[in-house]
Amino acid sequence: MTTTGSPETRQRQLDEAGRWLRRHGFAGVSPTPPLAARLAVRQRTRLATQLLLAMFIVAVGVTYTSSRQQAAVRGSAPDWLLVLILMVVGLVATQFLLHWWVRQADRRLADTLPRRVTLPARLGWRAVLGVPRAAIAVTVFAGAVVLALHAMSAPDSKTRYAAVVLLIGVCGAAVAMLVQLRYVLTRPVVADDEVSLSADLVMRSKDARNAINPSVLWALPISSVLDNSLGRWNAGWLAFAVLSAVTFALVSPCTRRSAVIARAAAEHAMGGTVTR
């Protein structure tokens, strides 16, 4: 599998792959059509994922507003909660299909390689993600669930209903994140030498870190919780979002660069490489 499209498109993809290599410490390495093809597929998938999450956030807000209007007229709004659950299922299913598309593209590319380099041992989440990033992601999701559950005991029915909507949205985002992370950690390596192996591991690390970015949790309260008045519940959510975002931003630069980890793993793997 190589880059597809017109010669201008192929050249643009090669230029983008060259810039990607330089950004990640591969100065002097020429981009190859297979690498350009893999990066192009991932760029389209990343854009589709961002658009999907943005649509999900908007849908949560629309569901919350519409359900409140229905509750004001009929006294309850169970139909809208069912719609929200179906949207969560659709989000997870679409994420699965997007990553299946990437896996199929990698598989077709791997079949064209004259030899296949693989890691003698699968990299774990500590090497791919880093403990600080993983800990913050887990803490943010757990904190969001705890706050939503706590709000469900509030005497205000409006706050309780907002908490239910938010809890469903948070659980949906968490499952979608786990689907992405599982794919990244279990997908096979596509490489035929040390450089392509390092590049593959960098892509894996970046994909994993993008998957656990909790930015969707910082946007969900805006669409489903915040109201005209800023009460204790809303103030708590704002403080939680700001503190978690600041912590995430501070830890990210402290995490070892993915290229450094990738090259160390590639150098170690080439000693016991499995090829075909």
Image (cartoon, helix red, strand yellow):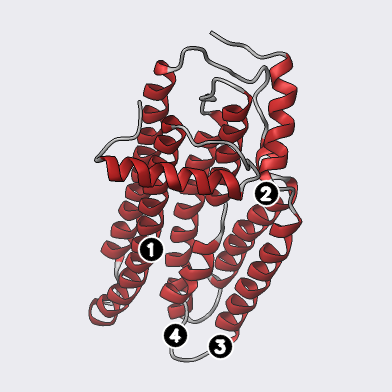
Q: How far apart are marks 1 and 4 (CA)?
A: 20 Å
Helix, strand or loop at disc 3? Answer: loop
Q: Residue 54 shows which numbered tag?
A: 1
* Number of other residues with Cα within 10 Å of mark 4, as a class: few under 14, some 14 to 19, many 20 or more: some
Helix, strand or loop at disc 1? Answer: helix
**Disc number lying in front (3 or 2):** 2
- Badge 4 amino acid: Asp
Question: Of label 1 and label 4, which has the lower sequence position?
Answer: 1
Q: Which of 140 and 34 is in front in this view?
A: 34
Q: Mark 3 points at which residue?
A: 231
Q: Quadrant of residue 127?
A: top right
- Badge 3 amino acid: Gly
Residue 210 x/y as whole percent: 54, 51
Quarter of the image with the N terminus is: top left
**Disc number lying in front (1 or 4):** 1
Q: Nearer the viewer, residue 55 or 260?
A: 260
* Number of other residues with Cα within 10 Å of mark 3, as a class: few under 14, some 14 to 19, many 20 or more: few
Q: Which of 7 and 76 is in front in this view?
A: 7
Q: Residue 78 shows which numbered tag?
A: none
**Label total for image:** 4
Residue 2 x/y as whole percent: 35, 29
Helix, strand or loop at disc 2? Answer: helix
Q: Distance between the residues labelled 2 and 4?
A: 32 Å
Q: Which residue is depicted at the point 51% across and 28% down?
A: 187
Q: How far apart are marks 1 and 3 (CA)?
A: 26 Å
Q: How far apart are marks 4 and 3 (CA)?
A: 9 Å
Q: State yes or no: discs 1 and 3 in contact (Cβ < 8 Å).
A: no
Q: Mark 2 points at which residue?
A: 134
Left or right side of 264 for 117: left
Q: Residue 227 shows which numbered tag?
A: 4
